[in-house]
Amino acid sequence: MERIKKLYRKLILVLVLVSGTFMTSCEDYLTIIPPSVVVHEDFWHTEAEVRGMMATAYITLCNGDAISKAIVWGETRAETVDYIKGSQNDNIKFLLEGLLYDDNSFASWSNYYYAISCCNLVLEYGPEVTGNDPNFSAGEMIVAEGEMRALRAYAHFMLLRAFCNIPLATKVVMSDAEIPSYPQVQPMEALNAIYEDLEIASTKVLKSSAPSSSSLGNVTTNAVYAMMADVNMWRAAFAKYYETEGTAVATLTPDEYYDMAIANCQKVLDRMNEIHTEFFDKDEGLKSAYNLIKNGGEDEMRKFGYSQVYNEIFGAQNSRESIFEFQIDDTNHAKGGNGIANIFGTEGRLNGQLVVAKKFMEKFKSDDLRKVAFTSFPDPDWTTPPTEVVEEYGVFKYIAKGTPVDGSGSREYRAGDNFDSHWIVYRKADVLLMQAEALVSRTTADETDIKKAFDITNAINRRWRADTTAITEPLTYTTEMTAEECLALVRDERALELCFEGKRWFDIVRMALQGEETSFSYEDKNHGVDSEEMERRYNRISAYFMPIAKEEMRFNPDLVQNESCKSSDNDDSISQN
């Protein structure tokens, strides 16, 4: 409980006040209130104090530590990445090798609970301010409540996907006597509570509008519905897991949760189509399947790897396909951008912690622009084999500001001292592929569902091809295609489309929960652990989740450690399989 005590003391003693909402960037900041002034009796009187706490919640979730963990938790153990040869970071190595040590720095969850506590404070004390400051209306507090419930849900959801059994923190404490125990809850219970927060938030946050720093940097309706869809994908997976285990904890069937996910996704897509029609549809050049961004430019430029899609979504910020992204600019790169740079590197060099796994490079077709756009693949003319063997490919998604425009393969990169890439939480392709997966995951999936899921997957795949009129190995549909075959296509496309965005490992965990064969590759990894040993380490579901940090266990004796945890106090203490 000392951990919670320290957390709240820190929150009460140190606050960042903002003069406006969290609308333009994570650095909307401004004055740190002296500790002698910040006591509860002297706080929660003005709109600025509420806005300051709200901004602190956003800032905490997009700082370097939080984003580094988002990448590591959601990507590191998947088939997409490997640690760089000669890496000295044992924390990354151990995770890639399936060793869950309780002193691993990535096992700390304090940043996310800090953000949750900020949300709780606004939810508890924000309403008081409507009676103290005439500039802060009840309507503004309703929106603030919606955003804080959604951010609290996001933080809890991140923790659940990484750790599985988590404490739910929903109560503000102002004294030691009020400190709750926050016991861990069963995952479905946590998911239901997260979903309840999101349902309430959906009625209170602002409606999504044209892409801008305010509509994409703050939680709006599309962000809430996208997260609700994601939560339902996880509720379906856990429902199937507990169904197999013979434990009745789900109130609905997996199919019913998938139905809800499909409906959630459709709400996002309908609103994005409305926005597209209002603001973009006048341009004939923007019309494409599902209103997706197309790869423009001359054929010759695309031949060399030029991708307008990459440049708009990742090179720039706040594209018309974005739904929610943490805003990071050249004034606050240290808060979030350095988290990306720390893991993937900067300026096109292999100076991060992770590189592209060899096997994953083979998943891209020869004319797939993502191979050049997302990685340091050195052969932009598509025909000539590399003149030398390349041992490691870097992750260039987020790092590159643009894609090559000629045969030199040159592009501009983000520097370490000016790393202004936003961290994208949800975007349109993610929602489309979630819907496609849900359609063909249901036991009732019919030919109409299969065709729709295929069409979504094919549209996303086609737009990345160098020449969309002559695609190498195109995806093909036949009326004999089964739901299982289509599901495999959807999952493969999610891996290619969303690689390095902190999504892939969580997809694999959902597959494992449903008793499916998980295909993340152990082969040709730099760690050299043989496949047989890796399979042994992953032969139960607890191994797919993070260990709880040793210090958290020490501070909260009510916590129950992941049974696959390997204690740093005893190298031989890993649970026997």
Image (cartoon, grey):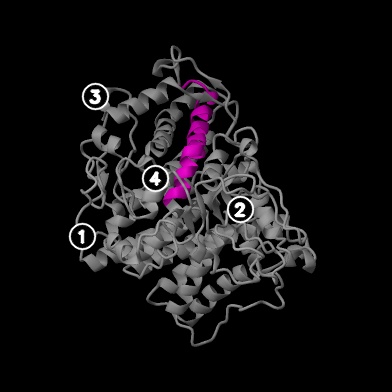
Cα separation between marks 1 and 4: 24 Å
Q: Amino acid at mark 4?
A: Asp
On the picture, is 63 further left or further right than 293? left
Instruction: Return the residue found at the far top.
Output: 36
Q: Which residue is mark 1?
A: 577
Q: Amino acid at mark 1?
A: Asn
Q: If you read the primary sequence from the N terminus, does the residue marked by circle 1 or circle 2 appear first? A: 2
Q: If you read the primary sequence from the N terminus, does the residue marked by circle 1 or circle 3 appear first? A: 3
Q: Is residue 29 above or below residue 316?
A: above
Residue sitting nearer the eye, 408 or 112: 408
Mark carried by residue 396: 2
Q: If you read the primary sequence from the N terminus, does the residue marked by circle 2 or circle 4 appear first? A: 4
Cα separation between marks 1 and 3: 42 Å
The answer to whether the residues at label 3 and label 4 have Cβ atoms under 8 Å apart is no
Q: Secondary structure at mark 2?
A: loop
How crowded pointer 2 is (Cα within 10 Å; few <14, some 14-19, many 20+) is rated as: many
Instruction: Work out whether residue 113 can be spotted.
Output: yes
Cα separation between marks 1 and 2: 38 Å
Which region of the structure is painted magenta? 44-73
Q: Amino acid at mark 3?
A: Ala
Q: Is residue 528 magenta?
A: no
